Image: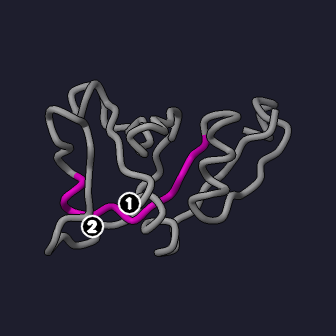
Amino acid sequence: AVHEGLIASYHHAFGIEQALLALVIRPVITGISWYTSFDTPDPSTGVIEIASGATVRGGHEVVADEIDAYNEIVWFWNSWGTGWGQGGRFAMSFDTWGQLLRRQGDVTVPIK
């Protein structure tokens, strides 16, 4: 994105607090471990959770673009098309995202 002139640079956020503070300003990308229980978000809420017995299938990069502070959830875009989740979107709790970041997840914040 820097090479193409779409952004001037980028920074990394570390931990859930910094990730949420960055997300208040603009969408961010996050690399997380993808658990088997994430494959099927709750159909009524769009929420994913690390279910008991779930295993890591690999890593995945998604875009966080919305905070629901009242319910303490963050909304994300996945790259698997609009037929997945809720029109290509899903949500997770602040706690779940924080767990994923503590487990070697990362957040990249674009700077315009």
Would you say residue 33 sits in the magenta stretch?
yes
Q: Position of residue 68 (x, y in %)?
A: 45, 35
Q: Earlier in the sequence, mark 2 or mark 1?
A: 2
Query: Does residue 96 appear left or right of residue 86 in this picture?
Result: right
Q: Residues within 10 Å of mark 1 (few under 14, many from 20)?
A: some
Please tell me whether mark 1 sits on a helix, a strand or a loop. Answer: helix
**Residue assigned mark 1:** 96
Whole-number angstrom distance, CA of label 2 to CA of label 1: 17 Å
Mark seen at residue 57: 2
Amino acid at pointer 1: Thr
Q: Is residue 107 above or below residue 40?
A: below
Q: Residues within 10 Å of mark 2 (few under 14, many from 20)?
A: few
Where is the C terminus found, in terms of image quarters? top right
Please tell me whether mark 2 sits on a helix, a strand or a loop. Answer: strand
Report the residue at 14% width, 75% height from top.
53
Toward the front, the furthest residue is 70
